[in-house]
Each structure stands twice: as structure tokens, then as C-alpha cells.
Image: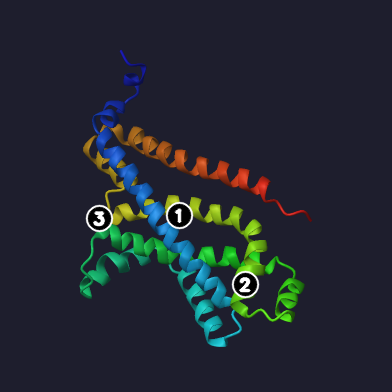
Amino acid sequence: MNPLDVIPGFDAVTDNWPRFWDGFVTTLQLLALSGVGAIVIGFVVAAMRISPVASFRVFATTYTEAIRNIPLTLVLFFCAFVLPYLGVGIGYFTLATIGLTVYTSPFVAEAVRSGVNGVPVGQAEAARSIGLGFGQTLTLVILPQAFRMVIPPLINVVIALTKNTSVAGGFFVAELFAAGKYIANDRGDAVITALLSVAVFYLVVTITLGRVAAFVEKKVAVLR
């Protein structure tokens, strides 16, 4: 007899293991795709916020402040219901990825901007004194130094994104939390076990990312 069988409702988890696993894989896909998208957009927005062009700074500031202060549920609602109503004919998984990307990108931008602000101003002045333009100064001088300070908070943003993927389960995406909710609704005696199982899956990802953040922080710690 498997010792785990004595746990109330655990058989519901084992019987629905393929559903759990598929939900976990979907969560990882949401995390990977929206994470990469958010990092790309976040770096662009951060560059615009420190750009010498005033219109770029205004746009980036407005974008960052607006999106950061809108609830994620509202962003995903817009993607899942409003975009299809407007004729955007793509699947709910893609719509959820877009919503998570847009919502996360301002937090990435702020993490990058804080790292850039940590680089001494003299570095940019020295770069300009030898004739480097804004783009060259940013990519060749500022970002390589800011990178060491950006990585730890950036991983924290990714950890937050991991947990935010659970919201997609309420918008027709069969991710991990949606799988747990299905089992809880199907088996009333397995609600706690199903939710605890979902929590374990999330912990596997978030604890791993936390360990990575701690390791990277030690490797790239800036001497003060």
C-alpha cells in the first residue's frame, strides 16, 4: 500500500496526474514566453525613459505608470474578451501570454532603470566626451555595468510572474491552477489536497528561481 494513499483525496491527484502535468507545462510555457516578451519590452521602455528625446520619456513614463496601476485581472479580461470582440482571432493561450507580457514589462523596466541609475553619472559623461552617442553609451558603457545590479530584482519580477500565471486559469487557459480547480470541483473531498498539490508545483518553480537569484547575487555583487 502506498503511504500517500492515506492522505484524504490524494487518489484524486494521482488519478488526474496527466491533467496536473499538462497544467504545469502550460504554466511553464506561459512563464517562458511572457517572461522573454516582458524582458524585451521592459528594456526598450527603460531605454526610452532615460532617452534624451522628451516624447520617448513621456510615453515610457505614461506606459509604466498606467500599466503598473491596472490590476492584472483587468488586463487579462481585456485580452480574453475585448480583443476577440475587436476581431483579434488568436487563441486564449496567446491572449494570456500577451496580457502577462504587457503587465510584467513595466516592472522589468523599473528594475532596469534602477540598475542604470546605480551607475555613476561620470561613466556616461566620459562616454559622451569621447564621442559616443546615446545608443552606444547605453549599450557599451551603462548596461554592462548596470547588468550586475539588475539581475537579482529581475529574477524577483520573474518569480512574481510565475505566481501571476495562475490568474490566466480564470480566462480559459488550462494552466496549473485551473487543473487544481477542476479537480477540487470534481471531488469535494479533495479540495485541500488538490490546492496543496498546486502549491507544491509553484514552489518547485519559485524556490528554484529564488536559489538562482541568490547564486547570481553572490556572483555579481557590487563592491560598495
Q: Is residue 33 above or below residue 66?
A: above
Q: Residue at x 25, y 34 (%)?
A: 16
Q: Residue at x 30, y 38 (%)?
A: 20
Check the image and tell me how it is coloured. Answer: rainbow
Cα separation between marks 2 and 1: 27 Å
> What amino acid is found at the position of numbered circle 2 in the picture?
Leu
Mark with earlier residue (3, 1): 1
Task: Please indicate whether residue 165 sits to the left or right of residue 160 in the image.
Answer: left
Which quadrant of the figure contains the C terminus? bottom right
Q: Which residue is mark 3?
A: 172
Q: Which residue is mark 1?
A: 161
**195 or 172, which is in the foreground?**
172
Q: Which of the 4 image quadrants contains residue 180?
A: top left
**50 or 194, which is in the foreground?**
50
The residue lying furthest to the front in this view is: 130
Q: Which residue is mark 2?
A: 138
Cα separation between marks 2 and 3: 41 Å
Local crowd size for mark 1, using a 10 Å CA cut-off: few (<14), some (14–19), many (≥20): many
Local crowd size for mark 2, using a 10 Å CA cut-off: few (<14), some (14–19), many (≥20): many
> What amino acid is found at the position of numbered circle 3 in the picture?
Phe
